[in-house]
Amino acid sequence: MLTYCHTGANLVFYKIHELVVLALYFFLDINAGNWQHFTTLAQSACEVTAELDSIIQADPRNVAKLPIESTWAFLLSGIVLLRLTRSSIALTLDTDRLERCMFAARDGLDLMSRRDNKTAGKMTLLLSQLSNSKKAFRAADGAIDTRLRVRTRLAASCVFNAAAWWRDEFGPEQIPVLESAGASHDGGPVDQGDMGARSAELVNDGAEDMNWMFLDFDSLDWGLAGA
């Protein structure tokens, strides 16, 4: 039984669970009729990112101590916000705030990747390139297309769906091997020239091998500095 706590790591634990459940809203159409559901989802994604970021800001050593589930939480938050800011209801949302939260999630993934977490590095790249993309979540005629094409992964379906968009645009033939890597931490988009060799690495390692995303949330160990 999950115990809700208003402070500390237990709050983050609760909010991650909440986000996973709310991400099931993506099985609904993203339209004005479901606006309240998706604003609730957006708020949850921003709260998860903010809570994890506050742990990191409290003590940089916590980056090395956050459990691997934090990588998934940053990724899910970022993909949720990216999809909503590309949707037909984007103009009715606080897109500036949602984009700031999305880039904060991207930067959180980048920080997690610096502890030799290859998965976090791959997902930093995926989120960075999709956030720059002019084709993602767009049909061939340019119309908005935020349908959930992958519908067999429960709450993770939206992440697999984003990976499918990434693969379509940034497959092996499209990705150059560059010299530098890393995400921008200024809260804005990342230039393609800054993506670096991780583009080729993501392709070569297989973007579809995502079984790591199915994690046991009941095994969290929040052994954080100063806790």
Image (cartoon, rainbow, N blue to C red):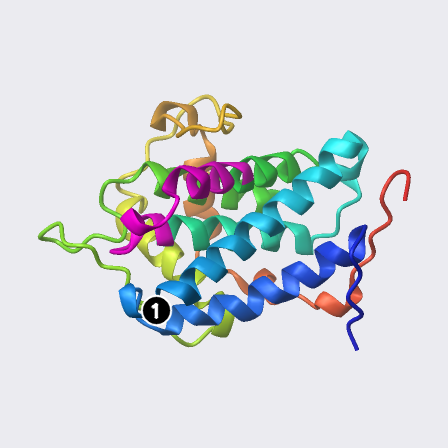
Q: Where is residue 89 drawn, in percent x and y?
A: 28, 55
Quick check: can you spot residue 45?
yes
Is residue 226 toward the left or the right of residue 158 in the image?
A: right
Q: Which residue is more in the foreground, 92 or 170?
A: 92
Outermost residue, right side: 226
The mark total stands at 1
Q: Which quadrant holds the C terminus?
A: top right
Is residue 58 toward the left or the right of residue 28 in the image?
A: right
Q: Residue at x 60, y 46 (%)?
A: 49
Q: Secondary structure at mark 1?
A: helix
Q: Which residue is more in the foreground, 23 or 94?
A: 94
Q: Where is residue 164 drawn, in percent x and y?
A: 34, 58
Amino acid found under the numbered disc labelled 1 = Asn
Quick check: can you spot residue 31?
no
User: Which segment did they paint magenta?
Assistant: 84-104
Q: What residue would you read off at disc 1?
A: 34
The correct choice, above or below, for 54 with respect to 37 in the image is above
Crowding near the residue tagged with mark 1, few <14, some 14–19, many ≥20 C-alpha atoms within 10 Å: few
Is residue 32 toward the left or the right of residue 220 in the image?
A: left
Image quarter for residue 35? bottom left
State yes or no: residue 90 in magenta. yes
Q: Residue at x 75, y 46 (%)?
A: 66
**How would you classify the magenta stretch by its main secondary structure?**
helix
Q: Which quadrant holds the N terminus?
A: bottom right
Q: Where is residue 23 drawn, in percent x and y?
A: 49, 66
Q: Residue at x 36, y 25 (%)?
A: 191
Q: Where is residue 75 drawn, in percent x and y?
A: 53, 51
Q: Residue at x 34, y 48 (%)?
A: 85
State yes or no: residue 70 in magenta. no
